[in-house]
Amino acid sequence: MSRSERLLDLMQVLRRYRQPVSGRRLAEETGVSLRTLYRDIASLQARGAHIEGEPGIGYVLRPGFMLPPMMFSEEEIEALVLGSRWVAKRGDPRLAAAAADALAKIGSVLPADLKEKLEHSTLLVGPRKPGGETIDLSLLRKSIRSEHKLALRYLDNDGRDSRRTVWPFALGFFEEVRVLAAWCELRQDFRHFRTDRIAEAAMLDDRYPRRRQALPKDWRAVNSIDPAGI
Amino acid sequence: MSRSERLLDLMQVLRRYRQPVSGRRLAEETGVSLRTLYRDIASLQARGAHIEGEPGIGYVLRPGFMLPPMMFSEEEIEALVLGSRWVAKRGDPRLAAAAADALAKIGSVLPADLKEKLEHSTLLVGPRKPGGETIDLSLLRKSIRSEHKLALRYLDNDGRDSRRTVWPFALGFFEEVRVLAAWCELRQDFRHFRTDRIAEAAMLDDRYPRRRQALPKDWRAVNSIDPAGI
DNA sequence: AGACTGCTGACAGAAACTGGCAGCATGCCG
DNA sequence: CGGCATGCTGCCAGTTTCTGTCAGCAGTCT
């Protein structure tokens, strides 16, 4: 196994652990001596991996992904840049910031002339119509990721106020509306909630009892919304 | 200079040339022997770079970019995936295909569990309203990239048919409308053309006399559309 | 205090990389 | 056709880099 493969392998092993791992254990799993493991960790850190080590504790990897070197065609880069610009314009503040960071990160490793080419890229995203969310969408994303229940105060179509506990599992981006897809405990059915009508939201400590992946399966069949396949 | 740095360097040197380059010259520029250069080329090809070599001619790099290994946070990946999905749903067929390819490429280098996570990603893009373009948008993008004039048959707001020659420099994505931004020779002014009203388009052999980067500068000031910065 | 862990330096052996050489195949030009 | 420029591969010795072992210091937890 070549060195670069081993480093990628090490990243994957690190990612599997949620608790701190000792260097000794990592060395065993990657089949390498402890001294070399320390050198490998240093290499990964130098390449931008967020690995934190504390004496007496072990190593922890801040969540994220290390992409190996890869080749993109001109159109693929255009698509990535346009997509990121759309997110940067239309996403909620945190997601928009993440999109801008990703763009900056990609830009920073490109040679100067390419970077300029992207800055002057000719695929533009128009401004968003005014009228934003009342709540913080990143809270919704967090609940979805961690499969936690969510307590909502919601204004329905006729302006009626209701309180519900829901199991959120997806966030849909339509033209001007963002929709939270969730199982509603009150109605005992799948429901969509326009995020601009969610007056308040709080994440509960309860996790919902079904796996998140299992939820959208029933729901998708009747809604014909699916992710563009990877 | 380490080997991996040298390989990246070699990519940049290759990209600078539009004509075929001999291995001898590449070896000189990267400060390495000819034998090693052949080995380096082989390494890059193995890593997915599209380098073509012909005996008696030299090497040519198909346009594209090699990204070095890099780290993305969880939210940055979510933003990239959501953005690519949006392009895959809303872009014209070629751009959509490029977005799907880019997603597949990223997916193929991720470990299985991560790939699954992305497939089940919970940020979805809704379907597009029916009613598409009559023409091929990739032709417009091609004209913009190569700074060539474009001959249009266009139906204006009142349904009047007109023929124009324009200097296209940007493509704007609004909610349900895509707009070509260009200098119109007929009106001697900047004009926007909704792509769904372009009845025919043909790229001319003429290049337009000003540099593309110079055009949007005047235009942006009055339209407040700008790319989310890289 | 003791056990566990991260981290660094030194050094010898192992592995990989590199350059030079030879040889063959392919395409261009006269 | 022959000559030339070029891509490509195998071989081998010299050089560089990587790796493992050993030692030592510092920080955290019980």
Image (cartoon, coloured by chain):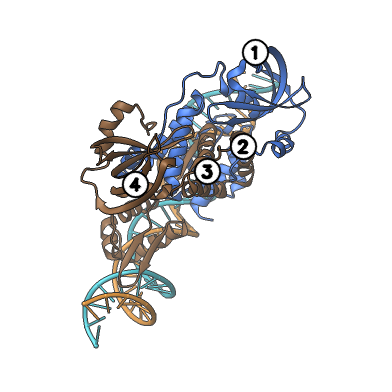
Chain colours: A brown, B blue, C cyan, D orange
Can you identify the residue that label 3 sits on?
A88
- Label 2 and label 3: CA atoms lie apart by 15 Å
**Above or below, B178 relative to A168:** above
Relative side of B10 to A187, left or right = right
Please report the residue visible at 36 percent of the width from the left and 29 percent of the height from the top. Answer: A225
| Mark sitting earlier along the chain (2/3) | 3
- Label 3 and label 1: CA atoms lie apart by 35 Å
Can you identify the residue that label 4 sits on?
A152
Q: Are marks 4 and 1 on the same chain?
A: no
Q: Regarding mark 2 in the picture, which secondary structure is present there?
A: loop
- Protein chain holding label 2: A
Q: Visible in this render: residue A167?
A: yes
Q: Quadrant of residue B117?
A: top left
Q: Amino acid at mark 4?
A: Leu
Q: Visible in this render: residue B102?
A: no
Q: Amino acid at mark 2?
A: Ser
Nearer the viewer's eye, disc 4 or disc 3? 4
Nearer the viewer's eye, disc 3 or disc 1? 1
Question: Residue A22 location, x and y as percent?
Answer: 28, 65
Nearer the viewer's eye, disc 4 or disc 1? 4
Q: Amino acid at mark 3?
A: Ala
Q: Are marks 2 and 3 on the same chain?
A: yes
Nearer the viewer's eye, disc 2 or disc 4? 4
Can you identify the residue that label 1 sits on?
B159
